[in-house]
Image (tube, rainbow, N blue to C red):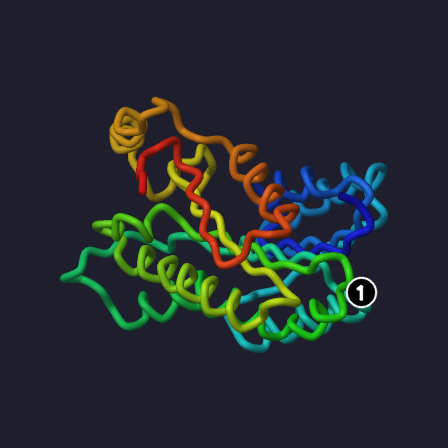
């Protein structure tokens, strides 16, 4: 796989950065970041020798203005887009059902749902001009499978992306494929802030493969979906068997 124009959001660390490493050889990349500037700049230097071009762009995708600004920056750098990886997102905090606030719900959906939906919409024209099997890959979460007790807003925001993936895949076919990956318990800084060590041990013990996943596990799944030319509208679980269907 080479000669593609690729955009990855949230590429300054974790899954986004590892996905950039997997997709870089022979391709042209635009790497988005919001707060992880140092990581994004270091990644640009790391990938420059192996890719056809790499640029970094800062942006706050929780606002319509931020999404529009990023899409304009992409358009200035690329006349067509082959791959959009909607990876930016996260859990703001845990709130039980009885404590949910409007502000928390709005912020959670803006971060995990509205941002990816809006950016996909804004990039549809560039994707339609992509002549190299254009596709979108959304990063959701295992939380959409079990509802995420104590973090139901987060789980619901990721479940909405699962629905959007299927709807967009049907609407944009046959020209653009849309898929998603739903990571399980992945060893990243995400859990350092929102999951206790005891809870992490419980998650790992409940996982049939008896380990947490790594960012490379998720990045390989994204790479597969980019290259899977006869797959669209699917959400692939990458969770060590923690949920099975």
Left or right: where 118 falls relative to 203: right
Residue 11 x/y as whole percent:
62, 49
At a point 49% along the width and 31% down the height, the residue shown is 214
At a point 35% along the width and 33% down the height, the residue shown is 241
In the structure shown, which secondary structural element does the residue marked by tag 1 occupy? loop
Q: Residue furthest left?
A: 98
Count of numbered marks: 1
Q: Nearer the viewer, residue 173 or 33?
A: 173
Q: Is residue 2 above or below residue 59?
A: above
Characterize the local packing of mark 1: few (<14), some (14-19) or many (20 or more) Cα atoms within 10 angstroms: some
Q: Is residue 189 above or below residue 99?
A: above
Residue under pointer 1: 78
Which quadrant does the C terminus fall into? top left
Which quadrant does the N terminus fall into? top right
Left or right: where 132 falls relative to 32: right
Q: Quadrant of residue 223?
A: top right
Left or right: where 31 falls relative to 166: right
At a point 39% along the width and 39% down the height, the residue shown is 184
Residue 79 x/y as whole percent:
81, 69
Left or right: where 180 falls relative to 39: left
Residue 36 x/y as whole percent:
60, 49
Residue 206 x/y as whole percent:
26, 29
Q: Nearer the viewer, residue 118 or 132?
A: 132
């Amino acid at each position: 796989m080479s000669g593609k124009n690729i955009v990855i959001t949230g590429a300054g660390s974790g899954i986004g950065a590892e996905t950039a490493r997997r997709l870089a050889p022979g391709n042209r990349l635009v790497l988005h970041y919001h707060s992880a500037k140092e990581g994004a700049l270091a990644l640009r230097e790391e990938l420059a020798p192996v890719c056809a071009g790499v640029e970094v762009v800062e942006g706050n995708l929780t606002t319509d203005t931020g999404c529009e600004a990023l899409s304009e920056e992409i358009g200035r750098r690329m006349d067509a887009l082959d791959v959009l990886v909607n990876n930016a997102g996260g859990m703001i905090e845990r709130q039980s059902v009885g404590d949910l606030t409007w502000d928390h719900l709005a912020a959670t959906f803006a971060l995990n749902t509205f941002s990816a939906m809006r950016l996909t919409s804004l990039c549809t024209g560039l994707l339609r001009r992509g002549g190299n099997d254009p596709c979108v890959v959304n990063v959701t979460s295992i939380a959409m499978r079990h509802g995420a007790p104590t973090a139901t807003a987060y789980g619901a925001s990721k479940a909405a992306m699962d629905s959007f993936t299927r709807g967009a895949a049907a609407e944009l076919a046959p020209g653009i494929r849309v898929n998603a990956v739903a990571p399980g318990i992945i060893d990243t800084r995400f859990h350092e802030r929102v999951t206790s060590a005891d809870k992490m041990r419980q998650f790992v013990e409940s996982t049939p493969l008896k380990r947490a996943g790594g960012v490379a596990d998720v990045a390989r799944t994204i790479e597969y979906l980019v290259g899977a030319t006869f797959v669209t509208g699917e959400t692939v679980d990458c969770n060590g068997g923690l949920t099975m269907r």
